[in-house]
Structure formats: structure tokens, C-alpha cells
Image: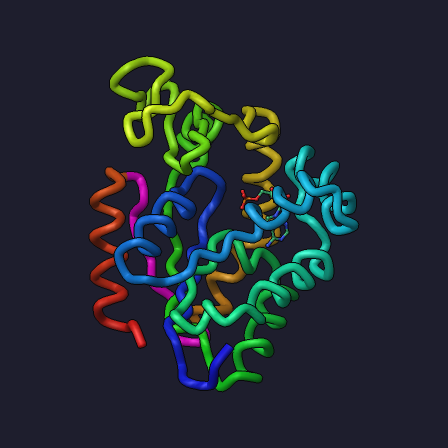
Amino acid sequence: MSDAQATVLILLGPPGAGKGTQARMLEEEYGLVQLSTGDMLRAAVAQGTEAGRAAKALMEAGALVPDEVVLAILRERMAQPDVARGIILDGFPRTGGQAAALDRLLAAQGWRVTAAVSLEVDDEAMVGRVSGRYTCACGEGWHDTFKKPAVAGVCDRCGGSDFRRRADDNAVTVRERLRAYHDQTAPLIAHYAAQGVLERIDAMGPIAQVRAALGRILGRVAA
Ligand code: AMP
């Protein structure tokens, strides 16, 4: 990290709220770097690292991975030079301990959170959103009901057919993940409200509408 304050945007919201979709769009449009602890943990699981071995069963059950495992992975990522472009935190922090550690990590560099945006949605709708989603190897996200490719089985973006579904994107696990969100992550809304950086967006609407609302916030607060 560098000392000059860069944009630090946190996306808060339950699984299915659109954090990853929005983070990828903002990354392209604003040149920010998306930091998804879920993606980092899935990579660790795939590589069979020590962190991955500690995380695997918890992720499959829809439970949170211990703070020290997540923080070690995040600290390592934050030490890369590209984060100086500004970051979008997607799925982190998820507990009070992680939020406090993030505040310390940023303060050590003279940084602070620019905005924490709560993507507000209805829980029941999230079960349907998450259990039907899948991703192309090129990164494009699709959904059995809400966003189908023009030609079944072929990605509109890259023409490929290498689609994947996450093991934890099923109705039973999503309910556990929603529970973890409300028990452990939703209290962070008050943490960021107290810091004066909280923003709320209605994230039940179309992707473009949510993106526009995020764009307005970034236009106002970006470093
Ligand atoms: P996500 O891709 O953000 O939906 O995360 C998938 C799973 O990874 C979660 O259900 C947790 O098991 C784990 N995970 C991701 N980020 C965190 C975090 N910040 N703290 C604890 N567990 C996490």
C-alpha cells in the first residue's frame, strides 16, 4: 500500500445481494481492484493450502471461516502494489473483529474507509437468486431464471461453455449463509454508521440501477 489515501469501498450485503457483480463492474469502470475474500478462499481450497484446508468444510456448510485465516489471506493481498489504485472489498469484513483489523490495517498506511455501502435486499429472494447462479470460466455470471445466455449452454461474452456452479450455492447452504450474515455481519452497518461512512442502496432493482446508485456514491466520495 502507499501512503496517499486511495478509495476504499466496502460492499456489505447478504449472499445474492450483487456484491460480486457490482464489484466487477466498478473495477472495470473506475480502475479499482476487487478484493473478494470468498474468491481468495476458493483459490486456497483449490490449491490445497493450509488456509484452504482450514476453510473448506466451513465454506461448504455456509459458516464463516475464522478471522485469523481470512485476515492472513487479506493482509497478504493488501501488500501487493496494485491496491494503491483503490479497492472494493467484496465479502470482507464480515465480523466485528475483521472490521477492527481492517481499520488498523488502513490506519497504519494513513488510509481510512471511504464508504461502506449496504446493499439492501429481501432474504427470501436471495435464496432464488443464489441457488440458480453459475459462472463461465471467462468470469461472466449467469442465472437459470434471471440471466440466461442467448443460446443455451453458450456464453454470450466468450462463446465458451465451461460453466461452474459453486458447491455452496444451494438452497440449504444459502439459508445458513443468510443466518451468518444477520448474526455476524449486519452489526457492521452500525460500525460504519458511527464512522459516518455508511450508505444504503435498495439492491432489489435491476443491476444497472444498483450500479448507477453506486456510481453516484463514488462520484461524491471517491478519493
Ligand atoms: P462469498 O464468496 O463472499 O459468498 O464467500 C463464500 C464463503 O467463504 C462464505 O460463506 C464463508 O464461508 C467464506 N468467507 C468469505 N469471506 C469471508 C470472510 N470475510 N470471513 C469469513 N468467512 C468468509
Q: Residue at x 57, y 32 (%)?
A: 175
Q: Position of residue 133 (x, y in %)?
A: 44, 27
Taking the image as shown, residue 90 lies to the left or right of residue 7, namely right
Residue segment shown in magenta: 194-204
Quadrant of residue 78 within the rendered picture: bottom right
Q: Is residue 11 left or right of residue 96?
A: left
Answer whether residue 150 is magenta in the image: no
Q: Eyeballing the image, is 94 above or below 138?
A: below
State the residue in front, 101 or 148: 148
Q: How many marks?
A: 0
Looking at the image, residue 187 lies above or below residue 193: above
Q: How is the image coloured?
A: rainbow
Identify which residue, 88 or 193, lies in the foreground: 88
Residue 104, how many percent across, how many down? 59, 78
Residue 195 included in the magenta stretch of the image: yes
Q: Is residue 200 left or right of residue 215?
A: right
Q: Nearer the viewer, residue 158 or 148?
A: 158
**Residue at far front of view:** 159
Q: Is residue 33 left or right of residue 53?
A: left
What residue is drawn where x is 39% and y is 70%? 85
Q: Quadrant of residue 217?
A: bottom left
The picture places residue 83, in percent across and down from the top left corner, at 46, 68
What quarter of the picture does the C terminus occupy? Answer: bottom left
Please tell me which residue is depicted at 67% across the width and 42% down the height of the picture: 63
Question: Residue 109 at what x, y percent from top left?
Answer: 52, 83
